[in-house]
């Protein structure tokens, strides 16, 4: 290769390494945030080890989306209308649950749940809480999967970090990957102008 082409190739390779390093740094930040959130979910889930029955004292439901009801020939318009207005389908509810904690202290928590008959006002549901601070935190049975979610987030975060730094390693290891990465970055920058 002539010196001019070799200089362009080397310049593109150097720029590719630079962009790979920046991508590695930003990828590390994102991966660590994912892992940190996963750890938070696991720690929070580990705190709620006791359960108690609580009473639903308030419920406010909002539709998931506000779409018009389309009535097709042969369908029952009254049934469709009742499903849309009674909140049994297509809505979430903010419920308030009261339970008695330490020293007969009344504790209150709010939860967002999918609207079902189980969460009607006056019903009793199981609330999981932190025994060291029963009024500060609580979760419902359907929300106890935070440990599983946390573990999944940690695994995803670690895999993401490994893939980010594998790509950085490959760019530094192979000059043609660095050069193609550099050229791709330049084309992307020019395309965004």
Image: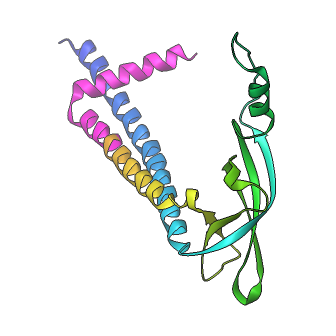
Residue under the point 39% across and 42% down: 24
Answer yes or no: is residue 68 visible. Answer: no
Vertical placement of residue 104 versus 185, above or below: below
Front residue of 35 and 119 = 119
Answer yes or no: is residue 3 visible. Answer: yes
Q: Position of residue 62 (x, y in %)?
A: 78, 41
The stretch drawn in magenta includes residue 102? no
- Left/right placement of residue 141 relative to residue 53 reads left
Vertical placement of residue 51 versus 38, above or below: below
The stretch drawn in magenta includes residue 179? yes
Residue under the point 21% across and 36% down: 173
Query: Outermost residue toward the bottom?
Result: 103
- Left/right placement of residue 175 relative to residue 91 reads left
Residue under the point 31% across and 39% down: 168
Position of the C terminus by quadrant: top right
Q: Position of residue 70 (x, y in %)?
A: 74, 16
Asked where in the image residue 68 lies, by quadrant, the reply is top right
Front residue of 170 and 39 = 39
Position of the N terminus by quadrant: top left
Front residue of 105 and 77 = 77
Q: Position of residue 10 (x, y in %)?
A: 28, 24
Q: Which residues are the magenta region?
A: 164-193
Main SS, magenta residues = helix
Q: Position of residue 105 (x, y in %)?
A: 77, 83
Query: Outermost residue toward the left?
Result: 1
Residue under the point 66% across and 78% down: 134
């Amino acid at each position: 290769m002539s010196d001019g082409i070799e200089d362009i190739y080397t310049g593109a390779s150097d720029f590719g390494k630079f962009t790979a390093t920046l991508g590695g740094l930003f990828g590390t930040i994102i991966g660590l945030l994912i892992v940190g959130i996963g750890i938070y979910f696991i720690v929070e889930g580990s705190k709620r080890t006791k359960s108690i029955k609580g009473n639903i004292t308030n419920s406010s439901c909002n539709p998931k989306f506000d779409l018009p009801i389309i009535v097709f020939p042969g369908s029952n318009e009254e049934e469709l209308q009742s499903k849309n207005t009674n909140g049994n389908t297509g809505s979430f509810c903010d419920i308030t649950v009261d339970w008695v904690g330490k020293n007969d202290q009344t504790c209150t928590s709010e939860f967002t749940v999918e609207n079902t008959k189980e969460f009607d006002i006056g019903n009793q549901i199981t609330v999981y809480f932190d025994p060291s601070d029963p009024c500060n935190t609580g979760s419902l049975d359907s929300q106890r999967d935070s440990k599983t979610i946390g573990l999944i987030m940690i695994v995803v975060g670690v895999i993401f970090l490994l893939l980010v730094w594998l790509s950085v390693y490959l760019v530094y290891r192979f000059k043609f990957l660095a050069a193609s990465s550099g050229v791709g970055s330049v084309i992307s920058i020019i395309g965004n102008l």
